[in-house]
Structures are given as C-alpha cells and as structure tokens.
Image (cartoon, coloured by chain):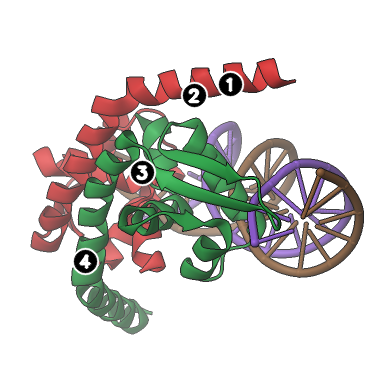
Chain colours: A green, B red, C purple, D brown
Amino acid sequence: MADVLSRIGDKWSVFAVMLLGERDHRFAELQRGMGAVSKRMLSLTLKRLERDGLVIRTVFDTVPPSVSYALTPLGRSLHGVVEALGHWAVDNQSSIEAARQRFDGEVALGE
Amino acid sequence: MADVLSRIGDKWSVFAVMLLGERDHRFAELQRGMGAVSKRMLSLTLKRLERDGLVIRTVFDTVPPSVSYALTPLGRSLHGVVEALGHWAVDNQSSIEAARQRFDGEVALGE
DNA sequence: CTGAATCCTCTCCGATACTG
DNA sequence: CAGTATCGGAGAGGATTCAG
C-alpha cells in the first residue's frame, strides 16, 4: 500500500488528476494549469499515471503534433477521492497556518 | 495548496494519521505499527504533524519516560479523508498492478 | 507542440551514535 | 523509552538542449 500511496500522493499527480477530472487536457494546457511544473516532471508524471492505468494518452497525427490526456474509469474513481482531499486542504489551510504560527511562536519563546 | 498537499500526502504522515485514528499511540508503538520507519523519520513526521495542529503530544514525566500521541479535532477531520484514500489504494491495488504489467509488456514488445 | 536525454544541484532519508 | 546530531549515499527534480 505504501507503494500505491506514494504514487497517488505525489503532488504533481494530484494536480494532474484534479485537472483531468474537469475535462481532457493537452500537454501544454496541463503545464499552464499546474503552476510551475517543468516539462520533465510533467512528462514523467503523466507516463507514470498512464502506466498505472489512470490516464489514457491519445496522439493526433497532425501538424503540429497534438496529444490529449484523459482519465480512465479507474482514474475517475481516484478523482473523487482526491477531490475530497483537495477540498480538505483548501478548507483547512488557514487552520494549519494558524497552528504553525502558534507553534513557531512557542518554540521561539522556549529558546 | 501544494504545500498542504505535500504535507498530508506524505507517506509516513498518512500512516501515522491512520494509526492514530484508531487510538492513541506511544512513540514505539507507532514505530512498530508503521513498518520500516526510522526513528528519525518518525520523529520528524510527528513534529511536523504537531506543528500543523493535527497531532497533540503528551509527555508523562515517569521513569522511563513515556510520550503519547493523539489526533486533535483537526487531525480527526483529516483522518476521515485519509481513510477514504487508503481504502481506494487497497481496493485498486490489483488493478494498478495489472495495468502496470500490461504497460510494461507493451513497451517490451515495442522495443 | 510534445516529448526524450543530459547534466548538475539539492534535498531527503537511513544508519549510527549519543543524551536525558 | 524517546528522542537529537551528524554524516554520506541515492534519488528527485530544474534547466537546457535536441528530435520528431
């Protein structure tokens, strides 16, 4: 299970799954939507997701070349779970930051 | 959000939250329950979780010393989400492994 | 446009040893 | 029992370059 968790817990994988959950994306679209991700990392992330059967890659033989990424049924089932995680993160971000500042303040006093 | 996700997506944090969701644990109990985690990593993980207000650390001034870890209300709210993630991982592990073998087989044929 | 390959840096993490 | 400090190897990941 550690293996599976480390895959789906990866930051870029989470972002990719969330974006692809909304709709299909092309490579460059994903890159723009995911903040500062290098082409290298995006490529590796997508390849791993494809290997794990979560994402399907469709190549259109046009000029210029175009590739579309979409979630498989398995990927969509993950999307639901990941979305819950994302919501939790958004909802509780301020609580976490507050706790962090409180903690850091106490540590500073203790020194 | 990337920051929060990388924290709660961390493998050891997930394990710790899942164990602490069942009941309070002492340091050594966590270490035994989490498979092969070094004292160093466990210590760092717990400290981060405490800093983020997800875990509360209680020291009993006995001989030998004893420390108990428990989830805060915020930590318990995370536990529900994380548990869903864990279930997904368990339920779909075989599908992922199958997809992986299929993918690797195709790559091998292509070469 | 979509990648693969190379290089190089920087962080993570395990092993070990030491403290209260 | 419950940690902290230090070191060293391994891997992640960014920048850049090249190819189809």
Q: Position of residue A71 (x, y in %)?
A: 38, 43
Instruction: Point out the frontmost of discs 2 and 4.
Output: 2
- Whole-number angstrom distance, CA of label 3 to CA of label 2: 24 Å
How many marks the image carries: the answer is: 4
Q: Viewed as shown, does residue B68 lie left or right of B5?
A: left
Q: Are marks 2 and 1 in contact (CB under 8 Å)?
A: yes
Percent across and percent down for residue C16 are 60, 34
Helix, strand or loop under label 3: helix
* Residue at the disc numbered 3: B12
Residue drawn at point x = 24 percent, y = 79 percent = A98
- Which SS class for mark 4? loop
Sort mark 4 into few (<14), some (14-19) or many (20+) by Cα contacts within 10 Å: many
Identify the amino acid type marked 2: Arg
From this viewpoint, is residue B87 visible?
A: yes
Q: Which residue is mark 2?
A: B100
Residue B61 visible in the current orientation: no
Binning the other alpha carbons within 10 Å of mark 1 as few (below 14), some (14 to 19) or many (20 upward) gives few
Pointer 4 or 1: first along the chain = 4
Q: Nearer the viewer, residue A75 or B35?
A: A75
In the picture of the structure, the residue carrying the numbered disc 1 is: B104
Asked whether the residues under marks 1 and 3 belong to the same chain, the reply is: yes
Task: From the image, tell me which residue sits under label 4.
Answer: B53
Q: Is residue A100 above or below residue D13?
A: below
**Of helix, strand and loop, which one carries label 2?**
helix
Q: Quadrant of residue A91?
A: bottom left
Mark 2 vs mark 1, CA separation in Å: 6 Å
> Amino acid type of disc 4?
Gly
The quadrant of the image that shows the N terminus of chain B is bottom left
Q: Mark 1 or mark 3: which is in front?
A: 1
Q: Residue at x 26, y 37 (%)?
A: B30
Element type at mark 1: helix
